[in-house]
Image (tube, coloured by chain):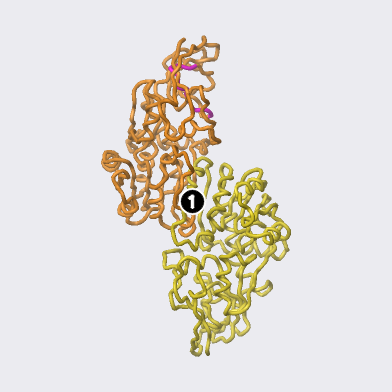
Chain colours: A yellow, B orange
Amino acid sequence: MKIKQILLASRPKGLPTLDNFKTTTATLPALNTGEVLVKPIYLSVDPYMRGRMNDAKSYIPPFQVNEPIESGGVGEVVESKADQFKPGDLVMSTNTRPFLPWATASIFPAGSLRKVDSSVPPSYYLGILGMPGLTAYFGLMDIGKPKPGETVVISGAAGAVGIVVGQLAKIAGCRVVGIAGGAEKVKLLTDIFDFDAAVDYKGNRNMSGAIAAACPNGVDIYFDNVGGEISDAVIQQMNFFGRVPLCGQISLYNSTEVPIGPRVQPKMVTYSLLMQGFIVGNYASRFPEGIKYLVELVKSGKLKYNETIEEGFDQLPDALLGLFSGRNSGKMIVKV
Amino acid sequence: MKIKQILLASRPKGLPTLDNFKTTTATLPALNTGEVLVKPIYLSVDPYMRGRMNDAKSYIPPFQVNEPIESGGVGEVVESKADQFKPGDLVMSTNTRPFLPWATASIFPAGSLRKVDSSVPPSYYLGILGMPGLTAYFGLMDIGKPKPGETVVISGAAGAVGIVVGQLAKIAGCRVVGIAGGAEKVKLLTDIFDFDAAVDYKGNRNMSGAIAAACPNGVDIYFDNVGGEISDAVIQQMNFFGRVPLCGQISLYNSTEVPIGPRVQPKMVTYSLLMQGFIVGNYASRFPEGIKYLVELVKSGKLKYNETIEEGFDQLPDALLGLFSGRNSGKMIVKV
């Protein structure tokens, strides 16, 4: 069977471009016993993937040049030589390596797949019920530890993680302030997702002043997805015993030099602040707890969700690049 | 009774000088019932006091211009009109305001004093059994959470806090590396205090290389007393899930502009690092636990201690300034 696949053509310096990717064709062999042929339906693009394009030590190995990119995905079984799966089943790959290659079809050993419940839209498993939703849940609950009446500020608030953090913080009884880029996203946060206030970082020259105005009682939790100057402005406003779950630093991922900024440590000592970097995989043993919590909120309508879905396998590289200009609102997904 | 006292004459810009202090005389009234006259025997000088010389919001109020400086101290009762105290008793002020004014004698209500056990040298209550010892204990144990076999790096390692952190980390089964200024302090750490290695920041142009060489398995805990470029070098070498108790930033206390440096957040996300600022007062409810732990180690000889004692009430300002050039080895104290 002939397939198309998208490879890493070269490692980017700074902001990636379409030239860092290339599309090739390949031929899959016939299935062996115990194997399953899977066609992806939805493939995910996520900010952390920028790190895998570098040849650098991190919590997951880098992509290899001339090998397919891989990302989170939900697929459909097309052909099966394993008893556990039949054509039409919706599947994801298992947690130990939860990725599908960027190929129009792939062969998997049956043991590396799991079926997903089709009572919710399958794309949700890449977002609110997948890595972004779990990232929001564990980062906010385990590191942020929200208490009723506290003020929570979220950067990248209209992104896949931020939108969930904001709603979970509201449910926890907090005042919630989102930071996002552009009037449309800011309106989305306050009008659709019930944030108490939202700050447009593209429309504000004086971020410190804007944050201070939106947070009259200071900031107790800063859930940080973006880093850089936005974070500098928020950290200035933090209260004694504030917590900073560090989820991502998308504003810095394409830096070609070591990013420089005001040192955070003096404020952290004076105000007894906690800052903790994390990835969702740190909480793998607690995923069932997180999924249970999120599924109940989704089914009861208490947790709203939005997605930006781009269409077509060939659009994958462009969708990934779109994350760095903030083209997405909510989770960015490609329908293959 | 005539006394001498040392006041804050003006707020320093940058490094304080002797001109920021002035000595005056005053007259104390006769004692009322319930009052006690106390002469300080030892007064403490500590890095955090630099912050109190600024007019800035912090965890303790600033010193006031033309009012006496105050600091930790052990005094002797000279005269008492309270049943609980008699001349010759050794006393400290109570935990809620644990300071003595910089005066040759002061009057206290009896309720604001407590007697100290004279079975250990009284100066120890300003160091290993006082704020510095408790700071070391809670910062290392509660934030650092040392595990046997881990590598602990301490900046300001020959200071009052650092010297205790290093020994407690050794007792916890860790490899302990100290950073200090000058060949003499480095030798003290390895020869007297049994540190596994020590790095002289004054003698090393390539701090990153020196830290890497001293920590072949990377750094799991970085107990930070100094901040700045020394911290930049250590944080580069940190392992996944490393912890950074932020105790002080003495290298930055005299900055007149916002200190700038490499942003720590990208490394913290990638390596799931935790950084937490704290002051010992956060643990006030657990002081008895800490003192019990430390007293037993001191009495059994497992915890060694050193002090730099300067002589004379008039030397107080100069001793405080000496902290910023690293003149002390271990706890800096003035014998009045």
Q: Where does residue B288 sit, x and y in percent of width and height?
A: 48, 34
Whether B105 is among the magenta residues is yes
Name the residue: 44% across, 78% down: A66
Whether A192 is among the magenta residues is no
Amino acid type of the residue that numbered disc 1 sits on in the rendered structure: Gly
Q: Is residue B59 above or below residue A176?
A: above
Q: Which residue is mark 1?
A: A261
| Of the pair A87 and B239, the residue shown nearer to us | B239
> Where is residue B333, by image quadrant?
top left
| Of the pair B45 and A189, the residue shown nearer to us | A189
Mark 1 secondary-structure assignment: strand
Name the residue: 53% across, 45% down: A273
The answer to whether residue A32 of the structure is visible from this angle is: no
Q: Where does residue B206 sit, x and y in percent of width and height?
A: 32, 51
The answer to whether residue A303 of the structure is visible from this angle is: yes
User: What span is colored magenta in the figure?
Assistant: B96-106
Main secondary-structure element of the magenta-colored stretch: loop
Q: Where does residue A332 sit, x and y in percent of width and height?
A: 61, 69
Q: Is residue B96 above or below residue A2?
A: above
Q: Is residue A218 left or right of residue B16?
A: right
Q: Is residue B194 left or right of residue A333?
A: left
Q: Is residue A122 left or right of residue B133?
A: right
Q: Is residue A78 above or below residue A318?
A: below
